[in-house]
Image (cartoon, helix red, strand yellow):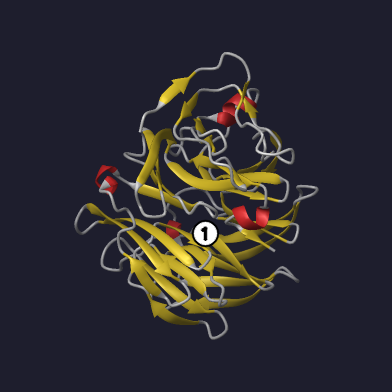
Amino acid sequence: MKQFITYFSAIAMLAASASCERDEVLIDIEQTQVTEPVMTDVYGFYLLNEGNMGSNKASLDYFDATTGAYNLNIYAARNPTVVKELGDVGNDIMIYGNKMYAVINCSHKVEVLTPDSAQRIAQIDIPNCRYALGHKGNLYVSSYVGMAQIDPTAPRGAVFKVDTVSLAVVGSVEVGYQPEEMAIIGDRLYVANSGGYRVPDYDNTISVIDLNTFTVTDVMTIEQSANFHRIDSDSNGRLWLSSRGDYYGNKSNLYVIDPASKQVIKEMGVPVSDMWADGDTLYTISTEWSYVTGQNAVSYTKIDMATMEVLDHNIIKDGTEKSITLPYCIAVDPVTKDFYVCDAKSYVVSGTIYCFNRNGILQWKQTTGQIPAHIAFYGKNENIINHYYNE
């Protein structure tokens, strides 16, 4: 697909107004036209690039579906006075209510931004923060708490509760070791604990927090594996939990769990590095490293969460997967059903994002920041467009 680059010496309009209800995003950056404009309730998405750890290279890109333009490093352009820009390791991003939240792991902060222009509103200080989830006016942020280093004595982690109006931390509760993603079912928050700093003594638990009292009321032990990472729920009230494994004989896997009985219903036999639930269809990618083989095993899978059956073991149908070195992120447009795969390449150079249509055919690709990792869709209806929206 033909691409061309335009350079703006003054402030340029990032997004033409799709309707009078839409806020406009204005930035003064380089734009690349990657596709034709598409007008839906999804205006585009933000891509948070992690940046190599210790280099303060986290960055934020924006794809504008209404113009077909991809915009690099917009945080720096919109916030030129912020020292070290976004900071060290962008670990998660989400839009909740009228704010966007970027979790910057090793800078120990959550950046609060305007979702229409990516301008900084505030900074919330949370140590070694990992992932965020919004629910009933509060933001919940998982935290390793301790220093960012391998340590067999690393402390237990925590979940911090933030009031999204005052942006103040209003509570915290201790959970398992090195907690990662979270999921909400009813009035309970489920936290996947990894124990990643305590290798080889990984954690094999899910902490259960009652959101009414903000206390841990239960701990689910999953005997089948450990080193948990991703977690989500389906329309039947089941949990989908991924394990990284131990990078030796215990391989990465995906488990379906009944939270009531605390039992594993099914082992899917699918390795997972990242996953995205679009309704009851789960898209997964895996770049599974093995110290036994000294190689990564790469896979792309689509799963029916209702039936717990694998629908497809190769969602890319045109051979483009051969050009992708290290798939690191996957996301699905909730309206068009286009899906996006980010390639981290060698982790120390600029990455690439690939857009595929619902049939797995490449539509466009574009250079990103370093280690493209997390996507948040931006649009008219939060209930529809926000993957992390829980209410």
Q: Residue at x 46, y 27 (%)?
A: 32
Estimate the x, y position of residue 2 in percent, counting from the top left: 37, 29
Q: Nearer the viewer, residue 265 or 42?
A: 42
**Mark 1 element type:** strand
Q: Which residue is mark 1?
A: 180
Estimate the x, y position of residue 37 in percent, counting from the top left: 52, 36
**Residue 84 seen in render:** no
In the displayed structure, 216 sits above or below 325; it is: below
Q: Nearer the viewer, residue 128 or 346?
A: 346
In the displayed structure, 225 sits above or below 132; it is: below
Q: Furthest-top residue in view?
A: 9
Q: Quadrant of residue 159?
A: bottom right
Q: Furthest-bottom residue in view?
A: 261
Q: Is residue 243 left or right of residue 167?
A: left
**Residue 199 seen in render:** yes
Q: Furthest-right residue in view?
A: 166
Estimate the x, y position of residue 186 in percent, counting from the top left: 67, 73
In the displayed structure, 270 sits above or below 119; it is: below
Q: Is residue 3 left or right of residue 137?
A: left
**Quadrant in the picture for the C terminus:** bottom right
**Quadrant in the picture for the N terminus:** top left
Q: Is residue 164 left or right of residue 131?
A: right
Q: Quadrant of residue 123?
A: top right
Q: Residue at x 45, y 64 (%)?
A: 282
Answer few, some or many: residues within 10 Å of disc 1's Cα (few below 14, many 20 plus, some between 14 and 19). many
Q: Residue at x 52, y 48 (%)?
A: 147
Estimate the x, y position of residue 332 in percent, counting from the top left: 48, 53
Q: What amino acid is labelled 1 in the image? A: Glu
